[in-house]
Image (cartoon, rainbow, N blue to C red):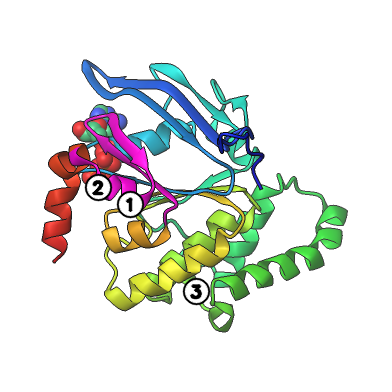
Amino acid sequence: MNAMTQSGLSTATPALQIEDLRKSFGKAEIMRGVNLSIGAGERHAVIGPNGAGKSTLFNLITGRFPPTSGTVRLHGHDLAGLAPFQINRMGLSRSFQITNIFPKMSVFENVRCSLLWAQGYRYSFWNMVNRSRALTHAAEEILEQINLTNRRDLPAGVLSYAEQRALEIGITIAGGANVIMLDEPTAGMSHSETDYIMDLIRRVTENKTLVMVEHDMGVVFGLADRISVLVYGEIIATGTPEEVRANPKVQEAYLGAVLEADH
Ligand SMILES: Nc1ncnc2c1ncn2[C@@H]1O[C@H](COP(=O)(O)OP(=O)(O)OP(=O)(O)O)[C@@H](O)[C@H]1O
C-alpha cells in the first residue's frame, strides 16, 4: 500500500517516473517532452491515435532506444545508458505487438526458457540439476496461471492466436518482474478472446504495476486505474477513466471519435 500524506497524495517512490522525455528520429521529433508518473501497483493504459508515439515510448522506457534527452526512473533508479536486458533484470518486463514465442518449442519449454533467462542462467551442470525441479515447478505454476496446463507439451506454434498471446503474457511475467508492459495485448482478437485475455491480465498483474498500450477502449476502461492520452508525442491528459473520458481536450483530439466509432 502506498504511503499517503494528509492531502491524500502518495509519497512512495513511483514504479516509473518519466521526466521531459524526448526522442527525435533525424529531424522528426517524435517524443516531445513526456512527463508521467506511474505508482507501484497501478494499472496504467497509454492510448492515442496511430503514430502518436506509443510504441516509441515503450521502446524508450525499456532501453531499446536511447532518448534524445530526459529521464526514465524505475523504482527511483535512473535507467540512462542501461541495455534492455539490464532493465529487465531490474524488474521490468515487456511483451511486443507481434507474438514473440518459439513456435517449435513446447509451451512448457517456452515458459521454462524465459525463467532460465530471467534468472541470469549460466551453464553449469550441477546448477542445472539443482535448479531443474524448482524451474519445472515454477514453469508449471505459470502455465496454470495462464490456463495452458492442458497444452503443456504441444509445440507453441499450434496454439490458437489467443492462446499464443496468453503464452506470451506468461513469458513476460515469468521472471517475476514487478512492472509489466504489454503492447496491444488484445489486438486482432474476437470479443470472447478479448474478455478471456482481459481476465488473464487482471489476474497475472495482481499486486504488480501494469503499463499497457491498447486500442480497444473496452479493455482500457475495464482494466486501467489511470489512463494517459498521447497525441503527437505529448501527453495531453492523465487521469482516472472517468476524468479522461470527461476531458474536453481528449474528446476533441481523440476519444470522441474513437468512442463514437465503437458504437
Ligand atoms: N526507428 C524509427 N525511425 C524513424 N521513425 C520512427 C521509428 N520508430 C517510429 N518512428 C516514427 O515515430 C512515429 C510514432 O510511431 P509509433 O510506432 O511510436 O506510434 P504508435 O503510437 O505506437 O502507433 P500505432 O498505434 O500505429 O502502433 C511514427 O511517425 C513513426 O513513423
Q: Quadrant of residue 36?
A: top left
Pinpoint residue 71: horizontal percent, then vertical percent: 49, 21
Q: Nearer the viewer, residue 126 or 199?
A: 199
What is the three-letter code of the residue carrying label 2? Ala
**In 3D space, how far apart are the residues under numbered discs 1 and 3 (Cα atoms)?**
43 Å
Image point 73% across, 69% down: which residue? 136
Label 1 beta carbon within 8 A of ligand 1: no
In this view, the residue farthest toward the bottom is 150
**In 3D space, how far apart are the residues under numbered discs 2 and 1 (Cα atoms)?**
6 Å
In this view, the residue farthest toward the front is 6
**Residue 155 numbered tag:** 3
What is the three-letter code of the residue carrying label 3? Pro
Determine contact: label 1, label 3, CB under 8 Å.
no
Image point 86% across, 60% down: which residue? 130
Pinpoint residue 140: horizontal percent, then vertical percent: 67, 72
Disc 2: which residue: 246
Quick one: label 3, few (<14), some, or many (20+) residues within 10 Å? Answer: some
Pinpoint residue 124: horizontal percent, then vertical percent: 81, 50
What is the three-letter code of the residue carrying label 1? Glu
The C terminus: image quadrant: bottom left
Which badge, 1 or 3, comes first in the chain's sequence? 3
Q: Nearer the viewer, residue 262 or 193?
A: 262
Disc 1: which residue: 242
Mark 3, secondary structure of its residue: loop
Mark 2, secondary structure of its residue: helix
Determine contact: label 2, label 1, CB under 8 Å.
yes
Chain part drawn in magenta: 224-248
Image point 34% across, 70% down: which residue? 194
